[in-house]
Image: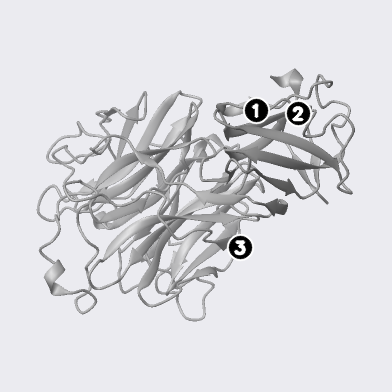
């Protein structure tokens, strides 16, 4: 059954929907960092943690950005706390005095999970608002690791739910165990780098887990019962570790970010790589270069760029991608790094940075002045308006619409198409003698994009009555 072309963007991160290319190149793109500084730092008295986990979302109902992040180590004997911040623009943040938990003799802080819970040995990678669950008490979902009871059955990965993102209820035992009990139904063993995806395409939850040298996943329909973890991504060699990953729905497919650990003895750095999937279970790395490069000399994110536990956020015609950064290397295990690199780092606290990317801008197809074309596989046209995300203001994109046999449909040839010569994330395609695509809407077609000194990021179809 052909895919349906709808209002969701169709990307070129993979070539799943491509039938033919001629004189076309495909490029992957890096995000641009916002300014030279983090947007959210550990700067309160109870925020002294050398590491950090974080999730940042935009709550469309409340029209506010929300961030949950790990801090702590504010006094001898204290360990992790989970904090909360809000923002109107995703750049300037406020840490509200919530009055929920005590730290340093006061509850005037933004702590939502205190250091007294599990002796402060938890860290929560993903904290998300759930559009699937109708139970208001479970509106927010979280997935986190606990080192509590390190040698016993209570260490591992827990889930938590919340009605408001502030007061959380945690599972009494790990959902995935670090030490599964012999002869039990315990799932595991798993390590401490995890992420959560709320899969709105298939109405389910996916946990991404570390199992040895592999990344594994587990699926739940109800956020209570989970499948046994199974590997889906393997290291290519012994000088890399697939440290952590998250996934998210994007358009008609899935994308994700992988925290990639370069274990070369002279580097010990981490960067973000792109992941892609068509079913949420089989994943691949389409491109090895980082989505966000590590900082240069003199910058705060010099040696590590790590994922945060939530999807990118659409802000106008840009994607906001939050990341954790630090000038500390990941040289934790003696014997795995060259001692001479040890002084070349800054061990102070980790912070949250912001990078932005053009909407749908993970990958593009392009042709130079000599022109090229790309033909899609057959798809059902699910609208009467075709839109392109393209840079063609010094060139052009023309669209030719073919039937499923590959024959040009009368009135929809490349010559009939009015050239698209703009830099726009939603440029409408028009044909000279056709007011819309209504006469072919619902039919199986192919699209052939003719590019000349132009770049195409995505395409979609909408209904004119919905615009």
Tag shown at residue 1: none
Q: Residue 424 versus residue 204: which sits nearer the camera?
A: 424
- When asked about the image quadrant of residue 155, the answer is bottom left
According to the picture, the residue beneath numbered tag 3 turns out to be 282
Q: Secondary structure at mark 2?
A: loop
105 relative to 39 in the view: left or right: left
Q: Residue 49 versus residue 322: which sits nearer the camera?
A: 322
Say which residue appears at 37% left-offset and 70% top-offset. 240
According to the picture, the residue beneath numbered tag 1 turns out to be 420
State yes or no: discs 1 and 3 in contact (Cβ < 8 Å).
no
Whole-angstrom CA distance, mark 2 to mark 1, is 8 Å
Res. 8 in view: no
- Report crowding for label 3: few under 14, some 14 to 19, many 20 or more residues within 10 A (C-alpha): few
Say which residue appears at 13% left-offset and 61% top-offset. 344
State yes or no: discs 2 and 1 in contact (Cβ < 8 Å).
yes
According to the picture, the residue beneath numbered tag 2 turns out to be 417
Position of the C terminus by quadrant: top right
* Residue 17 in the image, given as x and y percentages of width and height: 71, 51
Say if 189 sits above or below 21 in the image: below
Q: Secondary structure at mark 3?
A: loop
**Tag nearer the camera, 1 or 3:** 1
Say if 435 sits above or below 11 in the image: above
Say if 10 sits above or below 19 in the image: above
Say which residue appears at 34% left-offset and 60% top-offset. 146
* Residue 168 in the image, given as x and y percentages of width and height: 40, 43
Earlier in the chain: of badge 2 and badge 3, it is 3
Whole-angstrom CA distance, mark 1 to mark 3, is 36 Å
Res. 141 in view: yes
Q: Secondary structure at mark 1?
A: loop
């Amino acid at each position: 059954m052909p895919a349906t072309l709808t209002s969701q963007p169709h990307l070129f991160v993979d070539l799943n929907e491509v039938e033919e290319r001629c004189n076309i190149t495909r490029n992957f793109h890096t995000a641009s960092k916002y300014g030279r500084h983090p947007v959210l730092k550990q700067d309160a008295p109870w925020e002294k943690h050398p590491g950090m986990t974080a999730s940042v979302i935009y709550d469309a109902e409340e029209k506010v950005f929300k961030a949950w992040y790990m801090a702590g180590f504010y006094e001898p004997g204290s360990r992790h706390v989970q904090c909360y911040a809000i923002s109107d623009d995703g750049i300037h943040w406020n840490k509200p005095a919530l009055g929920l938990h005590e730290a340093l003799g006061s509850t005037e802080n933004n702590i939502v999970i205190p250091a007294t819970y599990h002796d402060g040995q938890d860290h929560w990678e993903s904290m998300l608002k759930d559009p699937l669950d109708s139970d208001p008490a479970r509106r927010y979902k979280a997935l986190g690791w606990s080192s509590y009871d390190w040698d016993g059955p209570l260490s591992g990965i827990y889930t938590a739910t919340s009605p408001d993102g502030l007061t959380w209820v945690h599972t009494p035992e790990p959902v995935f165990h670090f030490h599964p009990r012999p002869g039990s139904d315990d799932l595991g063993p798993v390590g401490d780098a995890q992420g959560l995806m709320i899969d709105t395409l298939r109405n389910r939850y996916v946990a991404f887990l570390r199992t040895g040298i592999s990344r594994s996943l587990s699926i739940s329909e109800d956020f209570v019962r989970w499948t046994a973890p199974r590997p889906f991504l393997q290291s290519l060699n012994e000088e890399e570790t697939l440290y952590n990953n998250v996934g998210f729905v994007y358009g008609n497919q899935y994308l994700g970010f992988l925290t990639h650990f370069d274990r070369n003895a002279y580097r010990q750095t981490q960067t973000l790589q792109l992941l892609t999937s068509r079913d949420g279970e089989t994943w691949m790395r389409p491109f090895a270069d980082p989505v966000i490069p590590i900082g240069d000399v003199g910058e705060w994110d010099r040696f590590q760029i790590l994922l945060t536990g939530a999807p990118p956020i659409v802000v106008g015609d840009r994607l906001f991608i939050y990341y954790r950064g630090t000038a500390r290397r990941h040289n934790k295990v003696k014997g795995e790094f060259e001692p001479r690199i040890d002084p070349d780092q800054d061990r102070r606290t980790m912070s949250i940075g912001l990078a932005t990317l053009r909407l749908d801008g993970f990958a593009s197809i392009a042709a130079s002045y000599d022109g090229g074309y790309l033909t899609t596989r057959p798809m059902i046209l699910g609208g009467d308006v075709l839109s392109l995300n393209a840079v063609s203001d010094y060139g052009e994109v023309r669209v030719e619409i073919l039937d499923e046999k590959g024959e040009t449909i009368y009135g929809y040839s490349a010559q009939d198409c009015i050239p698209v010569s703009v830099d726009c994330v939603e440029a409408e395609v028009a044909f000279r003698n056709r007011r819309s695509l209504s006469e072919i809407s619902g039919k199986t077609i192919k699209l052939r994009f003719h590019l000349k000194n132009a770049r195409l990021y995505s395409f979609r179809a909408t209904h004119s009555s919905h615009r």
